Image (cartoon, rainbow, N blue to C red):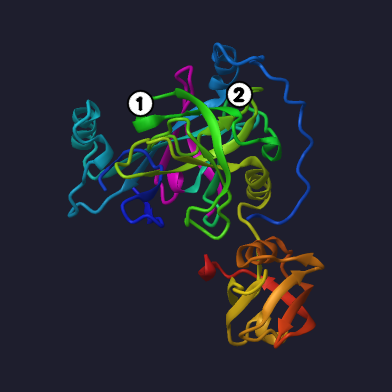
């Protein structure tokens, strides 16, 4: 499993590739209009999520991945399944599949032609991607595009008949305390539903420069990666991505990418197969004494250097929009259209300056 250390050393942030037997923001664009979120579960509170589940589950898919492994490397069971009833099952799968590494995750169908949204780490470096529907149909999927920085991927299957699909919901309307339902393929067992509430918004768990997660208390486990989080109208308001856990299993700290971030990335991947992002060529940190992004390093011969930005400058605005932190500036630059000019306001030795900097295209090496 992929793990990233968080601020508490006893815990680890785990992207959710399920069991492995062996081993932002996109370009700024207008979000689509959303259908009114008419709740399928009415106040004073849900007595059953069954109506919602019947509506959404047919469009939630299980994703199985095979990757070639080095025959000299011994395959290991995930820590999270040791000592559980799944241990025997996974050992048997490892024995049957020889040198192949198995992985499992989740996804959801976005339209009837077979476009599916999932996490990048679920399908990255896959030699074969198999998608299973709730009705038992199986398809081999092709990778359409993958964005490393947001961990979002789009795959495609071909079906002779139209497929069930889900609709986006507006994550900007989601409040802490709202009921949500998460769907996925925990531990590769198959379709599963859990319910809970939104515990927090805007979580930064240190997995990348565009972290802006919804925190959920609905149980999600390895294998739920790429699955959808629904509001009570059955609309997708987030993409399940990571958990924080000392054991690798759910402890009620799950994290999902809100739809306001996922939608433009998915649209760009469907159109182009990749994301074009802006690049400044400078290293930033939060300013200490006031809001803004302090420049700690300027790449030699990069866009920032050519535009006159210097080490020690504090960036306070870009295109007249205030920048209150390094993270907000990084996102603004990434969302800017490459090969365009941007006016950047800086404080240099207590003097305010406006620089015109040509935003370049982000090199692949920066990812």
Q: Which residue is mark 2?
A: 163
Mark found first going from the N terminus, 2 or 1: 2
Determine if the magenta segment contains residue 133.
Answer: yes
Tell me residue 112's x, y (percent). Answer: 65, 27
Question: Which residue appears at 33% of the width and 56% of the height?
Answer: 9
**In this view, which residue lies farthest toward the front?**
289
Residue 189: which numbered mark, if any? Answer: 1
In the rendered image, is residue 157 in sight? no
Start-end of magenta stretch: 121-147
Q: Is residue 131 left or right of residue 37?
A: left
Label 2 – label 1 distance at C-alpha: 23 Å
Tell me residue 267's x, y (percent). Answer: 68, 45
Tell me residue 164's x, y (percent). Answer: 61, 22
Determine if the magenta segment contains residue 23.
Answer: no
Pick the front one: 104 or 233: 233
Question: Which residue appears at 21% of the width and 31% of the height?
Answer: 87
**Secondary structure of the residue carrying numbered label 2:** loop
Residue 41: which numbered mark, if any? Answer: none
């Amino acid at each position: 499993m992929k793990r990233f250390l968080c601020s508490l050393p006893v815990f680890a942030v785990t992207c959710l590739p399920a069991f492995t037997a062996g081993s932002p923001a996109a370009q700024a664009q207008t979000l689509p209009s959303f259908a009114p979120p008419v709740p399928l579960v009415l106040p004073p509170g849900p007595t059953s999520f069954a109506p919602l589940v019947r509506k959404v589950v047919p469009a939630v898919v299980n994703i199985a991945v095979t990757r070639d492994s080095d025959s000299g490397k011994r395959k290991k069971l995930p820590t999270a399944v040791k000592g559980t009833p799944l241990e025997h099952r996974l050992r048997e799968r490892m024995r049957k599949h020889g040198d192949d590494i198995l992985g499992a995750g989740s996804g959801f169908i976005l339209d009837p032609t077979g476009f599916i949204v999932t996490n990048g780490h679920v399908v990255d470096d896959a030699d074969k991607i198999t998608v299973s529907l709730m009705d038992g149909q199986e398809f081999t999927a092709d990778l359409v595009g993958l964005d490393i920085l947001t961990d979002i991927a789009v795959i495609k299957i071909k079906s002779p008949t139209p497929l069930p699909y889900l609709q986006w919901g507006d994550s900007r309307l989601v409040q802490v305390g709202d009921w949500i339902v998460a769907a996925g393929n925990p531990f590769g067992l198959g379709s599963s539903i859990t319910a809970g509430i939104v515990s927090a918004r805007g979580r930064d768990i240190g997995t990348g420069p565009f972290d802006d997660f919804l925190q959920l208390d609905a149980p999600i486990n390895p294998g739920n990666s790429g699955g959808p989080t629904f509001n009570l109208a059955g609309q997708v308001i987030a993409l399940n991505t990571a958990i924080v856990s000392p054991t690798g299993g759910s402890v009620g700290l799950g994290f999902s990418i809100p739809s306001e971030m996922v939608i433009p990335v998915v649209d760009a991947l469907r159109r182009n197969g990749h994301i074009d992002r802006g690049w400044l060529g400078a290293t930033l940190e939060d300013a200490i004494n006031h809001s803004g992004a302090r420049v700690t390093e300027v790449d030699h011969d990069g866009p920032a250097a050519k535009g006159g930005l210097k080490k020690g400058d504090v960036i306070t605005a870009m295109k007249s929009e205030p920048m209150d932190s390094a993270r907000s500036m990084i996102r603004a630059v990434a969302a800017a259209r490459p090969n365009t000019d941007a006016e950047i306001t800086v404080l240099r030795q207590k003097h305010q300056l406006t620089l015109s900097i040509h935003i370049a295209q982000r090199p692949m090496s920066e990812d």
